[in-house]
Image (cartoon, grey):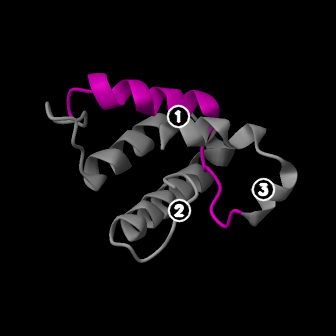
Amino acid sequence: MVGRSRLFQYFPLKMKKAIDLPVPISDSQISAIGGDYYEDKSFCREESGDINLWKVCNLFTSATKSSYIDTFLNRNVGSLLFINSLAQHLRNEKQSWFLT
């Protein structure tokens, strides 16, 4: 998911337009999520590598704290929609471009 999300900015325009839910945050924030997946004291992965969606949502929220005030709300809402899409994918209700 992190790798595909980081590549999103390089997708061809036609491919970007076909995606109904784009990445809501910047490349550096995606990198912060990747780092915090391993290092965050409160919301990092389990020793087995598993992580629940609550922790993922908190990693996204933490990463968007560095956003400017004019983009903060949009990025948080976009992150929530992104996490909801991930949950739908995991329940086999919807395909997600970032996990296929």
Marks 2 and 3 sit apart, C-alpha to C-alpha, by 14 Å
Judged from this view, the residue extending furthest toward the front is 100
Farthest right residue? Answer: 13
Q: What residue is rendered at 33% in x and 31% in y?
A: 37
Provide residue 77's location: percent of width, then percent of height: 53, 59
Considering every residue shown, the one lying at the far bottom of the view is 93
Circle 3 or circle 1, nearest the eye: 3
Q: Which residues are magenta?
A: 19-42
- CA–CA distance between discs 3 and 1? 20 Å
Which amino acid, mark 1? Ile
Give the residue drawn at x 29%, y 25%. Answer: 38
- Give the residue at mark 2: 96
Residue 95 percent location from the top left of the image: 51, 68
Relative image position of residue 3 (x, y in whole percent): 54, 35
Dot 2 lies on which element?
loop
- The residue under label 1 is 30
Disc 3 target residue: 15
Amino acid type assigned to the residue bearing label 2 in the image: Ser
